[in-house]
Amino acid sequence: MLFVRFSTLEQGLFPIAIAVKTTPIVAVAPLLVIWLGTGWWSKIVAVILICFFPVLVTRSRASRPRTPSTASCFQTLGASRAQEFRKLRIPYCLPYLFSALKISSSLAIVGAIVGEFVGATQGLGYLIMVSSAHLETATLFAAIAAAAFGRHHHVLCHRMDRTTRHLLAQRHDGMTMRASSVDVFQIPNRRPR
């Protein structure tokens, strides 16, 4: 939201975010282990570095209203910035945010495994490295199959997205119905069943 409010902030920080994203996490992971140790923090920072960019891009692009006239309408009606944020920007950007979360949930597993490749004594990345070094094919496939369970994060984000869209649609229909009872010429927005 700060990028929408302050365009100079976006112009200054967005190139840095792109530079961080284009740097391969495999190249950064050894530095994270040196700086943060072999504990959890190096893996958490690796996951954050991988997942942050898709959310940042979609969130900053989606925070702008569909058309400038929509934001102008809110300003004309005397809406405060908080009301514009709550009633225009958040409902508009939620589908984009959930799309980014779906992408990032899959990338989080990759980031954790790459972080474990470099400096870990446990975890899936460590198990993949050890089993491949010892040519233990069954263990290697089991670790890869366990990593595929990251799909559950994607399903969870999809369900949250669907529930949020449903709640927003109900809210929109309720607002249209209230408005139609006041103005006899306005037809309620109803979906075919």
Image: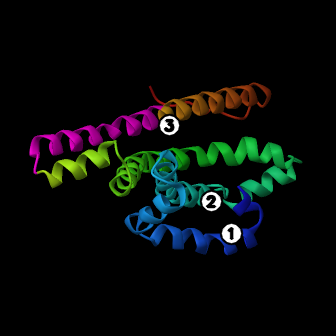
Q: Could you tell me which residue is drawn at 41 percent across and 37 percent down?
A: 153
Left or right position of 185 against 99: right
Residue 168 sits in quarter: top right
Q: Position of residue 76 (x, y in %)?
A: 86, 53
Left or right position of 141 against 74: left
Task: Name the residue that disc number 1 marks.
Answer: 10
Residue type pointed to by label 2: Ser
For residue 161, the mark is 3
Neighbourhood count class around disc 1 (C-alpha, 10 Å): few under 14, some 14–19, many 20 upward = some
Q: Position of residue 187 (x, y in %)?
A: 65, 33
> Is the C-beta separation of discs 1 and 2 under 8 Å?
yes
**What is the distance, in whole Å, between disc 1 and disc 2 at their CAs?**
9 Å
Q: Earlier in the sequence, mark 2 or mark 3?
A: 2
Neighbourhood count class around disc 2 (C-alpha, 10 Å): few under 14, some 14–19, many 20 upward = some
Left or right position of 168 against 185: left
Q: Position of residue 73 (x, y in %)?
A: 79, 53
Q: Earlier in the sequence, mark 3 or mark 1?
A: 1
Residue range (magenta): 135-159
In this rendering, is residue 173 above or below 31?
above
Q: Could you tell me which residue is drawn at 43 percent across and 45 percent down?
A: 105
Q: Could you tell me which residue is drawn at 43 percent across and 33 percent down?
A: 156
Q: Nearer the viewer, mark 3 or mark 1?
A: 1
Quadrant where the N terminus sits is: bottom right
Q: Secondary structure at mark 3?
A: helix
Per the picture, the main secondary structure of the magenta-coloured stretch is helix
**What is the distance, in whole Å, between disc 2 and disc 3 at their CAs?**
18 Å
Task: Name the residue that disc number 2 marks.
Answer: 60
Neighbourhood count class around disc 3 (C-alpha, 10 Å): few under 14, some 14–19, many 20 upward = many
Q: Was residue 97 drawn as part of the magenta stretch in this picture?
A: no
In this rendering, is residue 3 above or below 159?
below
Q: Secondary structure at mark 2?
A: helix
